[in-house]
Image (cartoon, grey):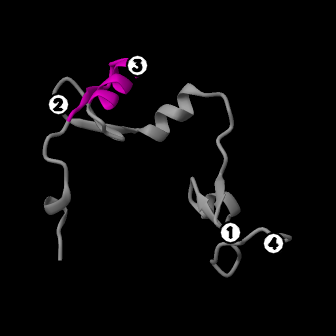
Amino acid sequence: MYVVKDIMTKKVFTVYENDTVEECAKVMLENETSSIPVIDRAENLVGIVTEKDLIKRASRIKVPVALELLGGFIYLDSPKKVFGRSKAGHVAYCEGYDD
């Protein structure tokens, strides 16, 4: 069985919390990474920025919650957030889709 240290990225690129969003995106693009840790001046971890964060901030366009592909759905966010939970604790699906 693998543990995290077996699969983690060992060369970590970071940005400072006061860097611009453009600087952050540039570092991510140049290093082909989809997320980047954010540190303060004392080099303490204070957060993480992901591609999704950049897309949401850079665009006023509403991002779809799911994509249909080969008769199934790929959720771009948690289905629980999209549909909520039923009283039984299961994901409640939309009715009326009978394709």
Q: At numbered mark 4, what does the secondary structure look like: helix, strand or loop?
A: loop
What amino acid type should be assigned to the residue bearing mark 3? Glu
Query: In which quadrant will I find the C terminus?
Result: bottom right
For marks 4 and 3, give the one nearer the viewer.
Answer: 4
Question: Separation of disc 1 and disc 4 at Cα?
Answer: 8 Å
What amino acid type should be assigned to the residue bearing mark 1? Gly
Between discs 1 and 2, the one toward the N terminus: 2
Q: At numbered mark 2, what does the secondary structure look like: helix, strand or loop?
A: loop
Numbered circle sitting on residue 43: 2
Numbered circle sitting on residue 71: 1
Q: Dot 3 corresponds to which residue?
A: 22
Q: Dot 4 corresponds to which residue?
A: 99
Q: How many residues crowd around disc 1 within 10 Å: few (fewer than 14), some, or many (20 or more)? A: few
Question: Separation of disc 2 and disc 4 at Cα?
Answer: 53 Å
Between discs 2 and 4, the one toward the N terminus: 2
Q: How many residues crowd around disc 3 within 10 Å: few (fewer than 14), some, or many (20 or more)? A: few
Between discs 1 and 4, the one toward the N terminus: 1
Question: Separation of disc 3 and disc 2 at Cα?
Answer: 20 Å
What amino acid type should be assigned to the residue bearing mark 2? Glu
Seen from the viewer's position, the closer of residues 19 and 51 is 51
The region drawn magenta spans 13-30
| 61 inside magenta stretch | no
Q: How many residues crowd around disc 2 within 10 Å: few (fewer than 14), some, or many (20 or more)? A: few
For marks 3 and 2, give the one nearer the viewer.
Answer: 3
Residue 28 placement: quadrant: top left
